[in-house]
Amino acid sequence: MSLHTFHIPVMGLAFTIDTPIKVAHYGINSVISIIEDGLIEKVRKVYSKKYNVPFIPIKDQDEDSRATRITTYLNLVKKIVDEKINKFRQSCSLTEALHYLDLLPDQSDIKQGFLKLKTKGSADDIIHYARSHAQPGTIDVNIMTKLDKVNYEKGKPLPSIYNDAHASVRGFANSDLNSSLVLSAGLNPALYSYLSNFDDFYPDQNGAFKKKIILKVSDYRSAMIQGKFLAKKGLWVSEFRIESGLNCGGHAFGTEGHLMGPILEEFKNKRASLPQSIYDVYQEALIEKGHAQLSEIPALKVTAQGGVGTANEHTFLLNYYELDAIGWGSPFLLVPEATCVDSHTRDLIKNAKEDDLYLSGISPLGVPFNNLRSNTKDQEKQQITAQGKPGSPCVKKHLSFNTEFTEKPICTASRKYQHLKIKELDDRGLMGQAYDKAYKNITDKACICTGLGTSFLIENKIDTKQEGNGVSVCPGPNMAYFDKNVSLKKMVDHIYGRANIISRKDRPHMFMKELGLYLDQLKKMVDEFLNEGTTKTEKKIQAFIFNMKDGINYYQHLLGRKLNLPEPEAHAFFDFLEVAQTQVAAQTTRFDLKALSLRMN
């Protein structure tokens, strides 16, 4: 059972890479990215020295080095967290006990017991109470399922088990952790099947799992498809983590106009039937694999994240949608006690306004990527492009998937790819704006393999000769409303409504912020359709418009009566819904006229 009703999701490669070491002993769950083993090895070296643990380097040429690095680092994190929580249980002071208990949500049974004890108990009573109730947060890990690059040895591809994501899974599965693997970015059948090779993902004789699976999903349909696919392999999904399509950090996997509110409503309405429908498939698979059947359906949590920014939103999501926890990501970038961000980048983040946070095309994956203007990685990229040397040295090669010009995949942010792509562009003979646009699309790609990990190196004064000094950062749009560094205590108090760290009065409700982002997306889609529309894109836009209208109607007639927003927030909420209706109607008219002309021609 979790002590807190929030978790800290994975952010970038480095921003949460040591977060469990910083916060797990307070009972806070957090997530580490385990895709970049080179960075992980450097982090392990830092913490081995800090906690007097012998450090034996794991070299690139060592057998199964990627998985071994991940396993060794995760075991170190667990060792440090275990030592911290054991020390607290054995010898915490009154100050430490009060800090631990003060962080807890007021509604929790443990906090309520503490508040009663605080009025009539002694200092020793409080210390004993804190020690007896202390438990660590989970050390969860994240893998983007599609980052499963094939690796080579002496020019020949290695077996698939040495692919990036496969090796990451093995690194986690072989670790001592009792925690969860968060799978994001969609279904990867080969990777999902590979999970079934590890005993820790199966229940023991008591029905408990040492290693659990969390699926990050965008809607109910995706949850059902992926949940059943894994169930057929004898693998149980312990949590569906619903993330806003656009109102999030990092890569943005937008839906077809489906909005967060209606998505959560569907999960709520089908919450009882969801585990049962997956369990029926799961039981059959367990029998086929020779595992004992379970006497009851395993626990299945549903959580949500993406754009949450106030205690009211946090509480409403928990209570109305009956969620188990809420993810708070980007705001924690301004909590030095919880995340690893270099001071310059942290200053950029806290000074960012709405226009500074935008959905970019910089990711070599070809997926829209939340970006912060003036980050040092983009400045570095622009400088070398202006010097006539576009593209980055491909140091990490984790995003090498393109085979347009080469037999062996390369990265679209690499110098090699951009040189070949620009040569192809020059041969096309484009002129003026058409050429400039195409050129920008090529050179816009950034080396986020290094950029998203550099913060840790800078903060810990580690040589960056290989990676460069440029830092990429990917906060969500919600970051515009947080403008100061705060302590862990202050941020947790903000989440639970005991403090307010947002100074601006014009922050829109998270649902309205997301709606605005989807309005922008709709306009962009219609603009592109007017220029080069096809029957395929016509059907896609029709579905998008229908889903957006359905979502606006949901907010107006169902949810609006249940939000209980204070004035003037309620007025702002409903006024924006009227604006949204007008904008969708305007885009629909533009779209219909073009679609009609296409059919007439």
Image: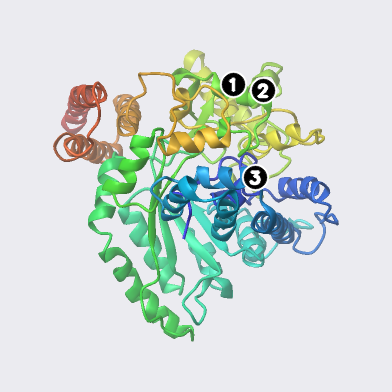
Circles 1, 2 touching at the beta carbon (< 8 Å): yes
The residue lying at 76 percent from left, 56 percent from top is 155
Q: Quadrant of residue 300?
A: bottom left
- Position in image of residue 532 (x %, y %): 33, 28
The residue lying at 36 percent from left, 55 percent from top is 222
Q: Which of 172 and 343 lies nearest the eye of the viewer?
A: 343
Mark 2 or mark 3: whose residue is earlier in sequence: 3
- Position in image of residue 359 (x %, y %): 46, 29
- Position in image of residue 568 (x %, y %): 25, 21
Check residue 22 in the rendering and tell me which mark sits there, or answer none.
3
The residue to which callout 1 is attached is: 348
Mark 2 vs mark 3: give the one in front. 3
Q: Is residue 245 left or right of residue 165?
A: left
The residue type indicated by label 2 comes to His
Q: Is residue 568 left or right of residue 412?
A: left
SS at mark 3?
helix
Give the alpha-carbon distance from disc 2 to disc 3, as whole Å: 21 Å
Figure quadrant of the C terminus: top left
The residue to which callout 2 is attached is: 344
